[in-house]
Amino acid sequence: MTKRKDAKRVEKNWLEWAVFGVGLALVAGTLGYLVYDGAAAGDDPPAVEVRLGEPRPTGHNFVVPVAVTNHGDQTAEGVTVEVTLEGAGGAGPERGQLTVAFLPRRATREGWVAFRADPRAGRLTPRVLGYEKP
Amino acid sequence: MRSISESLREYARGVAGGLLFSLPLLYTMEVWWAGFTSHPWRLALYVAATFALLLGYNYFLGLRRDSCFSEVVIDSFEEMGLGLLIAFLILWLLGRVSLDQPLSEIAGKTTVEAMTVAIGVSVGTAQLGAEGEDERDKGVGGSRAAAGGHHFGGQLVVALCGAVLFAANIAPTEEVVMIAVEVSAWRLLGLALLSLALGALILYYSEFSGSRRFVRFDARHDVLFGAVITYAVALAASAAILAFFGRFDGQGLAACVAQTIVLGVASTLGASAGRLLLQ
């Protein structure tokens, strides 16, 4: 391969043009999306919603799927969720707890809470206890 | 024009370099968190700053000496694109991004990681054994740098790249804050002196080989001057990266300065190594 000192024309093979094209598209797309996202996103504090799934018996207890969604515009850290089970027998209500380390804006994280009594016989109430600003 | 296999070899060097320099970052959870806790505009600014750095690096140290400035721009886009692709792929393999996450989370994590990967790709392409070439290329501005001995702007850009590459691996960790708030003022002074000494030492040995080629009237004065400049660049890079990762948010001035000095040791090493490459 001979090198020309004063080559002013850009010489590239098809592979290099392809990589450049993909690179340009990715960079432009990423930058465009970030700018749009920054302009569109508001400044609302985290708004956390908790949804419960269908209880299911395991070998030694019962588990209830929990989906935690953040509808706000800021990330919530250390989201603590408490689920109370009432009226399923036993003395008083039974409580299950769940902590999500980080809940980014618009994101959903899933987990389970466990109970000794059968939740299908009682009433489940989810509640968000609190979370920090990261 | 290069053949396809030559291009492939170049990209392979780039990918190796990108992974080599950024893998610690891809395995660090504080960096993933920065991806979704940072404001999108802060991320966009980070992308723009990195792109400017890549342009500078490719101009002074990039692969193609026999090229015009538009080729430098094209190379920078290629490296940035490779960085984004590699970062996404590795994060996906590590289970840190998945397609059921919101786009803002995926884009945030990938962007934060990809910037260091892109600088790594650039350094890898230009520096990791250029086989089959008669000599290592020095970029468009490189020939000028070689002829004039030391091109100041080029040295600054390369020092900045090295500093960012090294400091970015440490800046997001909790340890920097922990050290900064717990360390005594005397030890902090010691860290600053260590940084300056490291900078001077590395520079002295690199300038020494240079001073045999080019007549210098006062090498000792030059090394002192160079070490101070290197440390200044390193501190500026440290402060910028710490600010990006939100380490200055809600901190007092003393804690910010302490963090910058603690991180400064790493970025001085990077900046000195960067300046060595230009020799």
Image (cartoon, rainbow, N blue to C red):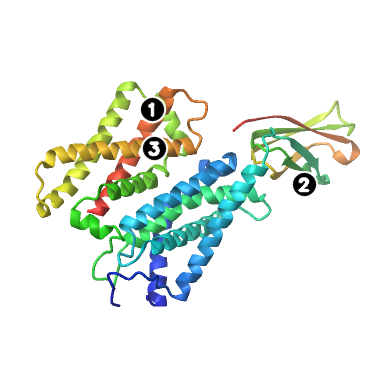
Q: CA distance from mark 3 to mark 1?
A: 11 Å
Can you see residue B107?
A: yes
Residue at the image point whose x is 52% and y is 26% from the top: B250
- Name the spot of residue B218 as percent of width and height, x first: 10, 41
Q: For residue B148, which numbered disc appears in the image?
A: none
> What residue is shown with label 2?
A59
Residue under the point 56% across and 44% down: B35
Q: Secondary structure at mark 3?
A: helix
- Residue at 47% of width from left, 57% of height from top? B80
Tell me where residue B150 appears, x and y as whole percent.
Answer: 21, 50
Q: How far separated are the C-alphas under marks 2 and 1?
A: 54 Å
Check the residue under mark 2 and report the chain it is in. A
User: Would residue A62 be visible to someone looking at this image?
Assistant: no
Task: Kindly identify the amino acid type of the residue bearing the numbered disc 1.
Answer: Ala
Camera-nearest residue between A101 and B214? B214
Checking the image for residue B258, the label placed there is: 1
Q: Which mark is residue B238?
A: 3
Disc 1 secondary structure class: helix
Helix, strand or loop status at disc 2: loop
| Residue B252 in the image: above or below residue A85 | above
Q: Percent x, y for residue A121?
A: 90, 38
